[in-house]
């Protein structure tokens, strides 16, 4: 697998921000997503946030514009203030970002975010299910900054290429984590609203990365500019899937004494096609997260559930209805979702 061109094919700052208001309707409509019933999106605004340690480079600005939207002001070393937007069908959800100087350490970093910076590249931080005051959801992206060297910056930025940046946005926002969060009020019990399984939440978001492309997004005219662009988007999705497979193995082997830290770094480089800087991030996370195999595990369980339900329902099967019914369950272990949708206790894999 040659990822050289993929890792350096950065996204143009105008590629996504120039899309029309119908873009997200196209993205969601092709796979049959609608706004969950009885949900007022105006009460659940989205604010994008980023660890305030941006380098003064065009590539960082491009990534931020693609992830967050537009009208973002950057300065060397820190993010001072910006306004971003997200599209949900025809609606614009606005949020603002302000970084207080007191929050930054001597390197322009938010010191409280040091652990997250060391172990994550992107995340979605949603309010609790019964939150009434702090109702914003945050799409976090970790980018390079001081004291990263130019080489480290280049290697870390390789994770934000044309294909993987779209895969990440699908995973974290639409129709991944953020959409699942919007369905939480429809969960059948208080327990389902409060508790869940990572194999469901991360499995759903990882499933969405593949499902969106399988259902037509990322083709010329629907997210891709041309045939080459479509291939780059698919390659990015596959690169992210390979990364999750590498986590599956490294997490188990490190915590059973079969792989050292250094061996895990090399494994991510050789078998996961990660840069050395990216491999360090993944390995550090693995030292504290022995079961970050749940991405691949959950995706495979959801794909099998969908396949089994389609066999059972035949011509009556609806992908839209499957997604709606899945999300209505909250995010319990897939075994419980299978029982609700299939009416049996058949194996998840």
Image: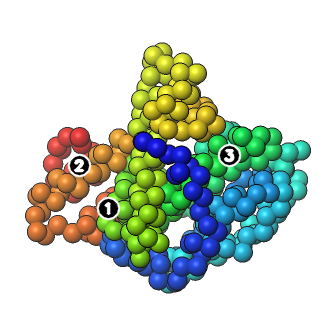
Place of residue 214 in the rendered image (x, y in percent of width and height, measured from the top left): 32, 61
Is 23 placed left or right of 151 in the picture?
left
Q: Report whether 262 appears left or right of 108.
A: left
Q: Nearer the viewer, mark 2 or mark 3?
A: 3
> Which of the 4 image quadrants contains residue 311?
bottom left
Of the numbered discs 3 and 1, the one sitting upstream in the chain is 3
Badge 1 density bin: few <14, some 14–19, many ≥20, Cα 10 Å = few
Mark 2 / mark 3, whichever is N-terminal: 3
Regarding residue 108, the answer to whether it shows in the image is yes
Residue 111's x, y, as percent? Answer: 79, 43
Q: Who is closer to the viewer here, 135 or 9?
A: 9
Residue located 58% across and 38% down the image: 275
User: Where in the figure is residue 216, as x and y percent of width and height?
Assistant: 34, 68
Closest to the observer: 11 or 54? 11
Q: Which residue is mark 1?
A: 214
Q: Give me the residue at 54% from left, 18% from top.
A: 260
> Separation of disc 3 and disc 1 at Cα?
31 Å
Q: Earlier in the sequence, mark 1 or mark 2?
A: 1
Q: Residues within 10 Å of mark 3 (few under 14, many from 20)?
A: some
Disc on res. 304: 2
Q: Is residue 59 above or below residue 90?
A: above
Q: Residue at x 72, y 75 (%)?
A: 71
- Residue extending farthest to the top is 257
In the picture provided, is 275 more to the left or to the right than 53?
Answer: left
**Cα distance between the residues tagged 1 and 2:** 15 Å
Residue 47 occupies quadrant: bottom right
Identify which residue is drawn at 78% across, 69% down: 73
Secondary structure of residue under mark 1: helix
Quadrant containing the C terminus is top left
Looking at the picture, the colour scheme in use is rainbow
Residue denoted by label 3:
154
């Amino acid at each position: 697998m040659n990822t050289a061109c993929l890792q350096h094919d950065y996204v143009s700052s105008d590629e996504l921000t120039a899309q029309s208001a119908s873009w997200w309707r196209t993205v969601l409509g092709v796979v049959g997503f609608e706004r969950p019933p009885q949900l007022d999106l105006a009460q659940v605004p989205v604010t994008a946030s980023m660890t305030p340690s941006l380098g003064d480079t065009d590539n960082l600005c491009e990534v931020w514009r693609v992830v967050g939207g537009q009208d973002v002001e950057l300065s060397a070393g820190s993010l001072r203030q910006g306004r971003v937007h997200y599209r949900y069908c025809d609606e614009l959800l606005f949020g603002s970002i302000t970084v207080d100087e007191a929050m930054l350490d001597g390197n322009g970093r938010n010191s409280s975010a040091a652990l997250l910076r060391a172990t994550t590249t992107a995340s979605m931080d949603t309010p609790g299910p019964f939150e009434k005051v702090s109702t914003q959801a945050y799409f976090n992206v970790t980018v390079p900054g001081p004291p990263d060297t130019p080489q480290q910056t280049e290697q870390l930025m390789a994770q934000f290429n044309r294909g993987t940046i779209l895969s990440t946005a699908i995973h974290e926002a639409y129709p991944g984590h953020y959409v699942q969060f919007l369905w939480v009020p429809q969960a059948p019990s208080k327990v389902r609203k409060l508790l869940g399984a990572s194999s469901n939440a991360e499995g759903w978001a990882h499933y969405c990365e593949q499902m969106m492309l399988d259902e037509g997004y990322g083709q010329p005219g629907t997210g891709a500019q041309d045939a080459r662009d479509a291939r780059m988007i698919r390659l990015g999705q596959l690169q992210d899937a390979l990364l999750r497979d590498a986590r599956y193995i490294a997490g188990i082997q490190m915590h059973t004494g079969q792989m050292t830290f250094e061996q895990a770094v090399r494994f991510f480089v050789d078998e996961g096609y990660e840069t050395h800087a990216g491999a360090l991030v993944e390995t550090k996370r693995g030292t504290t997260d022995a079961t970050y195999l749940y991405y691949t595990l959950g995706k495979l369980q959801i794909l099998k559930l969908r396949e089994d339900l389609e066999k059972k329902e035949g011509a009556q099967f609806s992908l839209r209805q499957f997604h709606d019914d899945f999300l209505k369950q909250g995010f319990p272990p897939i075994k419980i979702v299978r029982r609700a949708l299939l009416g049996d206790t058949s194996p998840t894999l």
